Image (tube, coloured by chain):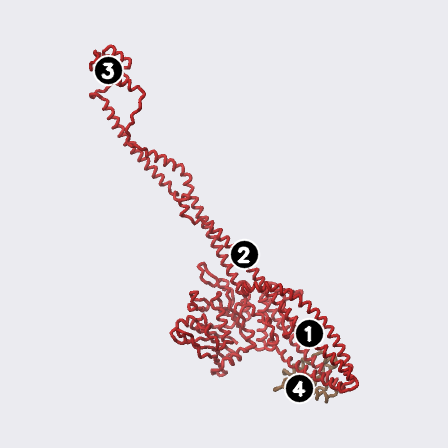
Chain colours: A brown, B red
């Protein structure tokens, strides 16, 4: 498990994921790769943020904002 | 990482080359106050942090004096360490040229010598090598001077984030919070912008937005004020706690001073009771007469002999005198009849009858016989007449012998008293011996108490500052009360503002949902949730890290304090105007706050440091993770027994620790420094003993510390 997978795992453990978004444990991705392909916008957004923040060189806040908004715009919410 | 050796060359009191070769595990450097412990610590500090400025005070005065004629010599501190079995060496040095007028320092350099995997040595910049072998965040947790520095959270500024950055992955979550905040904020702005574009509720929205902004500003201002109050309150509480700590020291100091006063009084009293005026007593108390009886006996013998001689002489003289008188009375060598024979009446009768009836011859008036009888009668009459006795001639006109006898008698009578002198004198000497013994014991106690005072002064700010603290306490107490009141008021205001803000936000969000595009609302809501997830996860990771330190600290704490009350260390996170902070508390088993004494507080902080060190070594099994720690006098408040227990515990951890302490150095009866027996019970990998040569107080060039490996 990579550092990025661990980060995703930590974020996915938050009760909002299971309680508010009703994502069952089986649908929670175990790797970042899976997260990037998730059908849940919140999972996908978090996964992209991990990818972009933890890459080298990391993207700026503005760039990440643009990317996520585009992503959410394209995803069925 | 392991420190192999540290070498000090002409650095302050370390004249010439002094090398300390260390072992893994516990290394103890013993030394009484002023023998060079702190200078050793300062040498390492200079190696890590020193620059090319103000070098003169670092030069050994002894070396300087030796080279006054312009010779050059080096001052250096070097450290050899092994990291991952490769040897690395750091050396900071400068050259000194000492003329008669002034000292010239030159060629300052900090060099590193690094061994690579194939055993080659490469010269490199000292700072770079230092940061590689001993990163700054590790150095921060590896060197401590005194007990006060052990509290790494006291300074406040960034202490927690430094700790997290150095020893936990929780810092990874910080940047997610930053991004989460930015994205959520942008999403809020997008919604607001969209609502503003709608003409239906424009006016109402603007009013609400303005009211929300106003409330937010008010809230932010109150919260800021609350945090400032909180910070001030913590500061005041710390000051009061500090004052309380010094108060205890002052109280202890006072008790010790009273004890010293009492001991000094006892010393004076004992000294005054010791009989020392022997010369006076020889005469005043007549000790001089102790052996008089013998003299008296001899004197008596002499008088007796003298008397005998005198009497013999007198007898002889008297006899001679008597014989002379007798011969004078004998006429014609005829022995006369005794006086009174014949009697007066016979004589008168014979004169009347003019006849001598003794020789039966006539004695006519005028005849020789008649005249003789007449004279005899007259002599007789004269002899029976009361008459003034003629002063008899004596041999010894003054009766000195008699005087000597009466003197002797007089002395004999006084022998009873004289015989008491010897046992009295014995009593005096025995008493003096006892009192001298008492005096020695008292002086020993005095020395002990004075050493105790030195210890207290060493760990206090000094008596004068103590007085200032006392003066401030009253003001601090009032401030504390005022701030508490202000906090209660602010808290109530903040809660009201939050409630009002919530209502306004809710009203605004009602408009948002009606007026803004659904997509924007959903994006905002998702980004709000993401921000919450990021923040909560960060909090959780920080809490987990703090829990880990708490757990490990308490494990160590209970081991160090095995015989004492320990309670439980509780590291508590809180926020103030400086940011997130850690507060170290001591809780009882019932979870109540306990005010630890200095010794317990030191143990708490030491436990936290050891816990951090353990965590660091778990993160990295070798290299910087397993870093050595250097402590200068960390256990001043412990006392001997607890220091022994503490050192034995440190030894059992098998991690490299260098501890400088003044414990275990005592004095023998002659005042020479000795290592106390208790040190034999201290388990350690290596020990050194620092001692100065004999020196002249006014002459710094006579100071030189000798290093002995024990």
For the residues labelled 2 and 1, say whether their Cβ atoms are less than 8 Å apart: no
On screen, residue B507 versus residue B130, left or right, reads right
Please name which of the two marks, 4 or 1, marks the residue nearer to the observer.
1
Which element is circle 4 on? helix
Residue at 55 percent across and 59 percent down: it is B254
Q: Which residue is mark 4?
A: A62
Q: Earlier in the sequence, mark 2 or mark 3?
A: 2
Q: Which residue is mark 1?
A: B223
Dot 3, how many residues are within 10 Å of its Cα: few (below 14), some (14-19), or many (20+)?
Answer: many
Q: Earlier in the sequence, mark 2 or mark 1?
A: 1
Dot 4 and dot 3 within a common chain: no
Which element is circle 2 on? helix
> Mark 4 falls within which chain?
A
Dot 4 and dot 1 within a common chain: no
Q: Which residue is mark 2?
A: B258
For the residues labelled 4 and 2, say whether their Cβ atoms are less than 8 Å apart: no
> Mark 1 falls within which chain?
B
Q: Which residue is mark 3?
A: B373
Dot 1, how many residues are within 10 Å of its Cα: few (below 14), some (14-19), or many (20+)?
Answer: some
Query: Could you give the CA–CA distance between mark 4 and mark 3, rounded to whole angstroms?
Result: 182 Å
> Mark 2 falls within which chain?
B
Q: Earlier in the sequence, mark 1 or mark 3?
A: 1
On screen, residue B495 versus residue B407, left or right, reads right
Which element is circle 1 on? helix
Residue B141 x, y percent position in the rendering:
56, 74
Residue B465 x, y percent position in the rendering:
55, 65
Which element is circle 3 on? helix
């Amino acid at each position: 498990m990579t550092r990025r997978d661990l980060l995703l795992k930590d974020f996915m453990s938050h009760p909002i994921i299971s309680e508010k978004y009703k994502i069952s444990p089986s649908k929670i991705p175990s790797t970042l790769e899976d997260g990037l392909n998730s059908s849940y916008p919140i999972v996908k957004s978090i996964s992209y943020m991990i990818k972009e923040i933890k890459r080298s060189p990391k993207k700026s806040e503005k760039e990440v904002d643009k990317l996520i908004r585009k992503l959410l715009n394209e995803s069925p919410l | 990482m392991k420190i192999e050796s540290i070498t000090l060359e002409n650095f302050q009191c370390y004249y010439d080359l002094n090398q300390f070769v260390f072992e893994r595990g516990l290394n103890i450097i013993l030394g009484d106050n002023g023998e060079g412990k702190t200078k050793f610590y300062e040498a390492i500090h200079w190696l890590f942090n020193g620059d090319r400025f103000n070098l003169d005070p670092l030069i050994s005065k002894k070396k300087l004096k030796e080279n006054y004629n312009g010779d050059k010599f080096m001052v250096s501190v070097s450290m050899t360490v092994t990291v991952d079995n490769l040897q690395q060496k750091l050396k900071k040095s400068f050259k000194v040229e000492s003329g008669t007028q002034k000292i010239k320092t030159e060629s300052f350099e900090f060099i590193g010598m690094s061994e690579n995997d194939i055993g080659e040595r490469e010269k490199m910049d000292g700072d770079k090598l230092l940061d590689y072998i001993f990163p700054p965040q590790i150095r921060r947790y590896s060197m401590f001077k005194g007990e006060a520095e052990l509290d790494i959270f006291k300074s406040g500024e960034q202490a927690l984030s430094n700790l997290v950055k150095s020893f936990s992955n929780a810092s990874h979550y910080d940047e997610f919070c930053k991004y989460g905040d930015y994205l959520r904020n942008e999403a809020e702005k997008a919604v607001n912008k969209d609502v503003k574009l709608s003409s239906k509720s424009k006016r109402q929205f603007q009013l609400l937005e303005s009211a929300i902004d106003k409330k937010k500003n008010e809230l932010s201002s109150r919260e800021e004020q609350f945090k400032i109050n909180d910070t001030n309150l913590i500061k005041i509480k710390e000051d009061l706690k500090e004052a309380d700590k010094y108060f205890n020291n002052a109280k202890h100091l006072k008790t010790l001073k009273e004890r010293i006063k009492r001991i000094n009084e006892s010393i004076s009293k004992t000294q005054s009771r010791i009989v020392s005026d022997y010369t006076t007593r020889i005469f005043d108390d007549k000790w001089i007469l102790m052996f008089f009886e013998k003299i008296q006996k001899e004197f008596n013998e002499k008088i007796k002999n003298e008397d005998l001689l005198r009497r013999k002489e007198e007898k002889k003289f008297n006899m001679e005198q008597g014989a002379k008188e007798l011969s004078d009375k004998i006429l014609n060598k005829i022995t006369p009849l005794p006086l009174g024979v014949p009697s007066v009446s016979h004589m008168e009768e014979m004169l009347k009858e003019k006849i001598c009836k003794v020789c039966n011859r006539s004695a006519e008036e005028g005849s020789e016989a008649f005249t003789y009888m007449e004279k005899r009668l007259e002599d007789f009459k004269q002899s029976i007449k009361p008459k003034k006795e003629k002063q008899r001639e004596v041999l010894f006109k003054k009766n000195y012998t008699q005087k000597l006898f009466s003197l002797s008698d007089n002395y004999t009578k006084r022998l009873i008293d004289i015989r008491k002198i010897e046992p009295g004198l014995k009593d005096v000497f025995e008493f003096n011996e006892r009192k001298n013994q008492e005096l020695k014991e008292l002086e020993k106690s005095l020395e002990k108490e004075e050493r105790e005072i030195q210890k207290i002064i060493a760990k206090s700010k000094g008596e004068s500052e103590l007085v200032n603290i006392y003066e401030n306490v009253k003001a601090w107490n009032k401030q504390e009360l005022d701030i508490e009141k202000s906090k209660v008021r602010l808290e109530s205001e903040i809660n009201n503002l939050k409630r009002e803000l919530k209502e306004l936000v809710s009203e605004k969000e009602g408009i948002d949902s009606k007026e803004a595009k659904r997509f924007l609302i959903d994006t905002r809501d998702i980004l709000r949730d993401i921000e919450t997830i990021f923040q909560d996860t960060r909090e959780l990771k920080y809490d987990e890290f703090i829990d880990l330190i708490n757990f490990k600290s308490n494990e160590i704490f209970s081991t160090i304090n095995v015989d004492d009350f320990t309670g439980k260390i509780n590291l508590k996170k809180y926020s103030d105007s400086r940011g997130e902070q850690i507060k170290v508390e001591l809780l009882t088993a019932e979870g109540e706050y306990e005010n630890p004494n200095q010794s317990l507080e030191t143990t708490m902080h030491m436990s936290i440091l050891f816990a951090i060190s353990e965590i660091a070594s778990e993160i990295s099994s070798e290299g910087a993770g397993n870093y050595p720690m250097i402590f200068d006098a960390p256990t001043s408040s412990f006392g001997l027994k607890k220091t022994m227990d503490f050192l034995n515990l440190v030894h059992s951890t098998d991690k490299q620790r260098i501890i400088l302490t003044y414990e275990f150095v005592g004095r023998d009866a002659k005042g020479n420094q000795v290592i106390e027996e208790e040190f034999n019970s201290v388990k350690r990998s290596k020990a050194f003993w620092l001692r100065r040569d004999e020196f002249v107080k006014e002459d710094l060039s006579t100071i030189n510390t000798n290093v002995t490996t024990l």
